[in-house]
Image: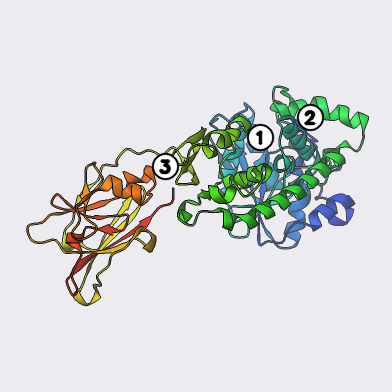
Amino acid sequence: MLKNDTPSDDALAKSELLNSDIQYALDVIPNSDHYLIALSGGLDSVALLQFVVPFLLHQCKQVEVVHVHHGLSENADEWAAHCQTLCERVQVLCHIEYVSVFSDGEGIEAAARKARYQAFRKYMRVGTILLQGHHMNDQAETVLMRLMRGAGPEGLSGIPHMRAFAQGHVFRPWLSLSRELLESEMLKQPLSWVEDESNTDLSFDRNFIRHEILPRLLSRRSNSLQALNRVAEKAKDAQDFMDSWCQQQMPSLMSSQYADEQAVNLSALVNYNDQEQRLLLRYWLDLFGVRHPAEKVFNRIWSEVIAAKGDAQPEVRWQGDRIRRFNGCLFLLSAADVNEEAFDLSVDLKLSELPYKLVLPAGTLLIESMVQDEVQVHRARVSEGRVCFVRLPSDDEVATVRSRLGGEVITLSRGRHATVLKKVMQSHKVLPWKRSRLPLLFYNKALVYTAMGLVDDAFVPTKGEQALKLSYNETAA
C-alpha cells in the first residue's frame, strides 16, 4: 500500500524550509566522500531520499542507494519497482539486491537482517557511510523488546547512532526524531512510501510492542519515547565503562603459553570476584564475535568447568561453540576445532620440487633446502618456535609428510630410549584437539620431525651438513 501517493512534481523541499529538528539531524551526518542509503521503501528510509539526498548532493557528495529484495512478501516486486522509481526521481543510482533468506534457528527477522547486511557489504568502500532510517520509536521498541528478554546493559543500549561496519560506518540520522515527526513532515512532500503488511502481524514481538504496548505507555506518559531513549543512552554509558575496564584486564588474564588461542588463564581469573569474572568472560566471548550462551549454560562454566579437577578436560557446549578447559586455561572452540579425526595426509617429498608449502587444517608447513653455510645445528623446543633443521634424506630413504596414525616413537636425548610420541605431546601440553592434525616427517618408517618443533636425535644435521629447513606456522583454534 502506498502512502502520500501524490502526483506532485514539485522540487524537493529546500533546506531553509526544513523542520529545525530534521535540519539538525542532517547537519550531524559524518563527513565522507561516499554515502550509501538503505532504502526499504518505508516511511523512514524514503525520508532519507526526501531530505538527505538533496542535502548531500548540494555538497557534491557521491550517493548511492541499495534496496534489498527479500522475497518474503507477495508485494516485494512492487516495492522494488517503487524504490527504483523514487531513486530516478531524485536522480541517484539504485541497486536492487535479490537475496534468499534462510532461518538458522534465530528467526526469520534475524535471518533477513543478516541477508541485508551481506548485501550492503558489497557496496561498502573505505570510509563509506551507510545511512539507515531508524528513528526514536524504533529505539523505544528495541529497548522494550530486549527488556522483555532479560537483557543487560549491552542489550538495553539499543540501536547505536553510529557503529563500524565493513570498511566504513553505519549512521542513523533519524534516531533522535520520532516517527510522528517524520510522517508529518513527509506528508508535505511529494515522495510516497509503502507499508509492509507484516508490520501489523502481532505474532512478532516488535509489532506487539509497537501496536499494543507503546501506545498505552504514551497515553500514560507522553514523554515515554524520550525516557526509553535515555535508558538506552545510560545503558550504553554503563556498557562502555565495563568494556573499558575489561579491556584493561585482558593482558593479565590471557595465557602466555597459549597466546595464539587467546586462552584465559584460570589462575588469573580467580583473582576477581564472581561478578567481575562474569563480565570478563562475556567480554572474552565478544572478542571472538560469538553469541553468548543462555544463562543456564553460562552458569555451567563455573559449576562444571572451572570447578573441575585440575587434570580434567570438561567442556560446555552451546549452538556451534564450546568452552573447554585444558592445562589450567579456558579455550573457546568451534565444532570444527575439536574434530580430532586424523586428516588424510600422505605426501612424498621430492628435493627437486622444494621449496614446498603444505597448507593444513591447523597450520602451514614450509619445507626448504638449505645450503651448507646456512645450516646451523638447531634443536627447537615448543616455546622457542617452530623452525627446525633435519639432515637430507639419503638415496635409499623416502621422505614423507603424513598425519599421525598412533604408536609413533621419537628419541630426543642421546643415549636414552625412544619415547612414544603420544607421551611427548602430553608432556609438552600440546592441545588435545590439535594433536592429530600436526604434520610429521618420516624417512621411510622412521619419525624424523614433528610440527611441535622437535627433531629425532638421529636426524639432527651435523655442522656443515646440508639439511632441510622446516617452518610450521600454526593456525589458532
SS label for mark 3: loop
Q: Can residue 171 be seen in this view?
A: no
x 69%, y 61%: residue: 61
Q: Which of marks 1 and 3 is nearer the N terminus?
A: 1
Quarter of the rendering containing residue 343? top left
Q: Where is residue 169 in the image (x, y as percent from the top left)?
A: 65, 54
Instruction: Estimate the spatial distance between the alpha carbons at disc 1 and disc 3, rounded to whole Å.
Output: 44 Å
Q: Looking at the rendered structure, which numbered label has been put on residue 79?
A: 1
Amino acid identity at mark 1:
Trp
Asked if residue 312 can be seen in this view, the reply is yes
Farthest bottom residue in view = 373
Q: Which residue is at 18% across, 56% downward? A: 349
Callout 2 amino acid: Arg
CA gap, disc 2 to disc 3? 43 Å
Sequence order check: which comes first, mark 2 or mark 3? 2
**Residue under numbered circle 2:** 210
Crowdedness near tag 1: few (<14), some (14–19) or many (≥20) residues, C-alpha within 10 Å: many
Q: Residues within 10 Å of mark 2 (few under 14, many from 20)?
A: many
User: Closer to us: mark 2 or mark 3?
Assistant: 3
Task: Judge whether 181 appears above or below 107 on screen.
Answer: below
In the rendered structure, find residue 184 and report the number of the disc placed on it.
none
The type of residue carrying mark 3 is Asp
Q: Name the residue under label 3.
A: 337
Side (left or right) of 197 relative to 178: left
Under circle 2, the secondary element is: helix
Nearer to me, 355 or 275: 275
* Nearest to the observer: residue 225 or residue 267: 267
Which part of the image, by quadrant, shows the N terminus?
A: top right
Which percent across, then down, holds residue 212? 81, 24
